[in-house]
Amino acid sequence: MDVLSEILPARIPRRAAPRLAAIAILLGLLYFGKVFLITLITAVVIAFILEPLVVLIMRLRIPRGSASFLACSMALLVLYFGSLAAYAQVTILLSDLPNYVRQINEIGSSATERVEKLEESFNDLLPKRMQERTVIGETPEVAQKKNRRKKTVETPPPVTPQVQEVRIQQERPSLLNIAYRQLSQLYEVLLAASFVPFLVYFMLSWREHIRRSFLQIFEGEDRSEVASSLRVIAELTRAYMAGNFVLGMLLSVLSTALFLFLRLPYPLLMGPVSGFLSLIPYVGLPLAIIPPVIAAIPIYTNLTQYLILCTAIAFLHLIAMNVFYPKVVGGRVHLNPLAVTIALMFWGMIWGAAGLALAIPITAGIKAVCDNVSGLEPYGKLLGD
């Protein structure tokens, strides 16, 4: 027993140390290389989605390079016209911004008046003795005691105004530094986004060459396992993203029709925004309600109208998630709810909003690899449903 107690604690840290170091290095790469990895994974997902369109165009006896270029051009045109329609709605919204500010100020002032009336009514309910204390503030005896305490306590030496100005200047960052940080972040995002179309085009046009060269790295059974894993990952990603896109379009059309019926401002903008925000796991319902409620501020004057709007959106969201989602998206990714929740927390903390959008495809890809690689099947079952 003494020999085992001396050997086992020595061996366990030696085995655990490399794994902990590898995990730390991996987390560091995921965090510090998030812009590069988000750009690359986004391009891979888009390439998986556009691959069936490329195959369809190739049936017209068009080479793969030209078919890939046509598919990317069509996707960019759809994105351009969608952005143009959204820009037109946003321009009208910005022109109507003073009405929103005035209505919000009126709501704030009315809320302040109501709070003051509640305070007055509450004070009327109090006994007269407590009312005098609340109005006067404190009795003369309490004031004398406080004055005595102030006299006994030595007052600190006053700080000169010059020192205060220096401290304020040191603590307050300049507007140029704030603007530089924001512009640098925006530049990084735009620079990374500019690479996505080129990456997608090369991934589609050089698909067979990349796949064949990547499989040459492995030998024997490993090559077949990697090939099956890549095929399953592509099918899962394509099915999941296509299902969500179809469901998002359906929700956008239904939301737009609902907002037109309720005479909500800017229905062509609020409908798609609310519809696609509704697809975000767990927080989709409140996110889908916020834009229409903000748009309704200039025309809705009482609480009943807001309740009707929120109830209609919630009903539409529940019907979509419980009726359409299982049929359109269904169990395509085969992930259990606990794995989905942990994946959203992990990737959201590391990559922010992009991590929330890519969490489920990445986790589904990891599960597909575990299901098709011998020795990793228990991890796939742990993630699966």
Image: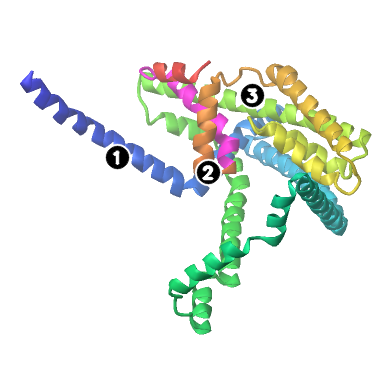
The relative height of residue 240 versus residue 195 in the rendered view (above or below) is: above
Q: Give, as a three-letter code, the residue at label 1.
A: Ala
Q: Indicate whether residue 363 is drawn in magenta.
A: yes
* Residue drawn at (43%, 21%) of the image: 370
Q: Give, as a three-letter code, the residue at label 2.
A: Trp
Crowd band around label 2 with a 10 angstrom C-alpha radius: few (<14), some (14–19), many (20+): many
The relative height of residue 370 versus residue 36 in the rendered view (above or below) is: above
Crowd band around label 1 with a 10 angstrom C-alpha radius: few (<14), some (14–19), many (20+): few
Q: Quadrant of residue 218?
A: top left
Q: In whole angstroms, how far apart are the C-alphas of marks 3 and 2? A: 24 Å
- Residue 145 visible in the snapshot: yes
Q: Position of residue 184 (x, y in %)?
A: 56, 62
* Residue drawn at (81%, 40%) of the image: 292
Marks 2 and 1 in Cβ contact (< 8 Å): no
Q: Residue furthest left?
A: 3
Crowd band around label 3 with a 10 angstrom C-alpha radius: few (<14), some (14–19), many (20+): some
Q: Position of residue 5 (x, y in %)?
A: 11, 23
**SS class of the residue under badge 3?**
helix
- The residue wearing badge 3 is 239
Q: Position of residue 287 (x, y in %)?
A: 71, 38
The relative height of residue 279 versus residue 190 in the rendered view (above or below) is: above
Which of labels 3 and 1 is toward the front?
Answer: 1
Give the dominant element type of the magenta stretch: helix, strand or loop. Answer: helix
- Residue 277 visible in the snapshot: no
Front in this rendered view, residue 329 or 286 = 286
Residues rendered magenta in the picture: 354-376
Q: Which mark is residue 21?
A: 1
Which of labels 3 and 2 is toward the front?
Answer: 2
Q: In whole angstroms, how far apart are the C-alphas of marks 2 and 1? A: 21 Å
Q: Indicate whether residue 95 is drawn in magenta.
A: no
